[in-house]
Amino acid sequence: MRNAECGMRNEPQGTSTPDLGEGGGLCRSFRIPHSTFSAAQAPPAVRIRKRSRGFSLIEVLAALAIFSMSIVGLIEGLGMAMAQWHSAENKAKALMLAENVMEEINYNSQLTPGQDGAQYDPPDDRFTWASEIEETDTPGLYKITVSITWTAGGQDRDVTLTTLRAEHSQAQLQYAVTE
C-alpha cells in the first residue's frame, strides 16, 4: 500500500518503510517514530552510534595517579637540589673566609706559634674561625692551619686549610726589597 502524502508504503502491524518515489529522495515530512524500529532494524542514518571517543573513569584515574606520583617526585627532587645548592654555597663561603684568614696570617712578617680564633660579625655570624701556627722540625718553617666551622641542618660542618711558610729574617727581607 502506498501513502499518497509522502510516498510511504504501509506495512502490516503499523510499520512503514520509505518509498524513494520518482525523485529518488525521501519525503520532507517523513519521520520514523522511535518505537517503530529497533537499532538493528533502523536505517543507517537513524542507528544510535556507540561513542568510542573519550576516556573511561579508570583511564582518567590511572592517568591522575601517574601524574600525581611524577609531581611528588619532581617536588622532592627540587627540594634535594635546593639543599645541595645551599650546602655548596655555605662551603664556598667558608672556603673564601678561610683563605682570607690565611692571607692575613701570611701578611704578617713575624709568625708566632699559637692559636687564635673568633666568630665572624653579621652577616657571616654563623661562621667561626680558628687558626694554629706550629713550628716544624725544620728551623724557620711553620705549619699554618686555618679552620672555619658552621652549623647547617643540625650538623657541624668545617673547612680546613693547611700550608707551610718559611719565616724570613730582616736581612732576607731587605735583600728581596733592594733587588
Image: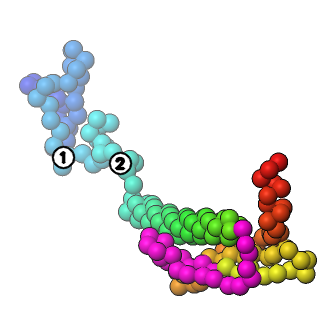
At label 2, which amino acid type do we have?
Arg
Q: Name the residue under label 1.
A: 34
Numbered mark located on residue 116 in the image: none
- Residue 1, visible in the rendered structure: no
Q: Nearer the viewer, residue 117 or 9?
A: 117
Image quadrant in which the N terminus is located: top left
Q: Is mark 2 on a helix, strand or loop?
A: loop
Q: Is residue 3 left or right of residue 80?
A: left
- Figure quadrant of residue 98: bottom right
Residue at x 50% of width, y 68% of height: 79
Does 48 sit above or below residue 175?
A: above
In three-dimensional space, the C-alpha distance between marks 2 and 1, rounded to whole angstroms, equals 20 Å
Q: Determine if the magenta segment contains residue 126.
A: yes
- Residue 45, visible in the rendered structure: yes
Residue at x 25% of width, y 17% of height: 24
Instruction: Name the residue furthest right.
Output: 138
Q: Determine if the magenta segment contains residue 32.
A: no
Does 107 sit above or below residue 35?
A: below
Q: Which of 151 and 141 is in front in this view?
A: 141
Numbered mark located on residue 51 in the image: 2
At label 1, which amino acid type do we have?
His
